[in-house]
Image (tube, helix red, strand yellow):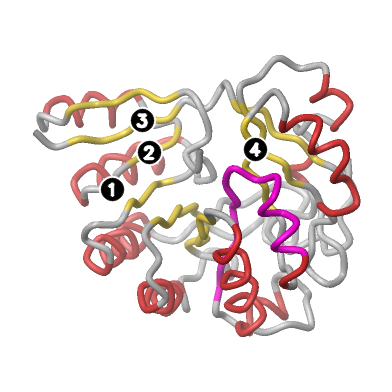
Amino acid sequence: MKKIDMYYPGKTKSVSITGQACSLNCSHCMGHYLRDMISLKEADNTDSSSFLISGGCDREGKVPVNRFLDEIKMLKRKARLNIHCGLVNEDEAKTIGEVADKVSFDFTVDDEAIHEVFGLNKGSEDYIRSYEFLRRYTDVVPHILIGLKGGIIDREYEAIRVLKDMGTEKIAFIIFRPTIGTPFADRKPPGVMEAADVLRFARKALPHGYITLGCMRPGGSYRDSIDRMAVDIGVDGIVNPTPGAVMYAKEMAYDINIKEECCVL
């Protein structure tokens, strides 16, 4: 029987170690998604089985995880940790590996997007190098944003090829959604069929890998359509699937496994 994991990650709380501050203010986010995260202090008083440790980036594209290691180690005593760290050098990767159960890493090989969307004076080699460092010391799951350039799909296919050649076994995909108050607020998500084509390409590239459709994607009819297509494509997991997609998976004779934590964990 075909199997699929459906994630409802209520038991994983998201923590921003920088509050609402972010030095990059990328065109698709502008720190918007930090606002709903709790602080480290609040996390210490929260009864959760796991935490996503994230935050805003500095001008080098790093989330300053190492500055908060003592507090993070305290959380580690009571819960599993998924750390979203941004770019790293090898020493930083090694330190993060000592506390992380998993690492989420935003992966791209699109130099134009790195410069124009992220506003970073970096290149694809910096992302590849950071990913390699993290893999040496922990279990890292690369995340690919479909439609990174304000809804335009460009180098996502190349990112998948690079990850395949590096021996990656798990990729999480998210999809661009216009966000109020950002430079990309008036843009449109990539077409549903085009986004599905990226997932289909990844499925063929990693036939035995674990592919998830992550929590960040447009809502409404778009979400229901892409979720159903993801079922047809054969992704291994969907985060917060629409009821219609769950029903469709049942109709297609999938064995559905319900999980209550972050898809990376």
- Residue 137: horizontal and vertical position, in percent? 60, 60
Q: Secondary structure at mark 2?
A: strand
Q: Which tag is nearer the camera, tag 3 or tag 4?
A: 4
Disc sitting over residue 225 in the figure: none
Q: Amino acid at mark 4?
A: Leu
Give me the C-alpha separation between circle 3 and circle 1.
11 Å
Name the side, left or right, on which 251 lies relative to 197.
left
Residue behind mark 3 = 6
Residue 43 vs 157, above or below: the answer is above
**Pointer 2 or 4: first along the chain:** 4
The answer to the question of whether label 2 and label 1 lie on touching residues, with beta carbons closer than 8 A, is yes
Q: Amino acid at mark 3?
A: Met
Residue behind mark 2 = 238
Q: Amino acid at mark 1?
A: Val
- Residue 116: horizontal and vertical position, in percent? 71, 78
Residue behind mark 1 = 235
Residue behind mark 4 = 81
The answer to the question of whether label 4 and label 1 lie on touching residues, with beta carbons closer than 8 A, is no
User: Which residue does the image show at 45% across and 54% down from the upper left?
Assistant: 173
The answer to the question of whether label 3 and label 1 lie on touching residues, with beta carbons closer than 8 A, is no
Q: Which residues are magenta?
A: 92-108
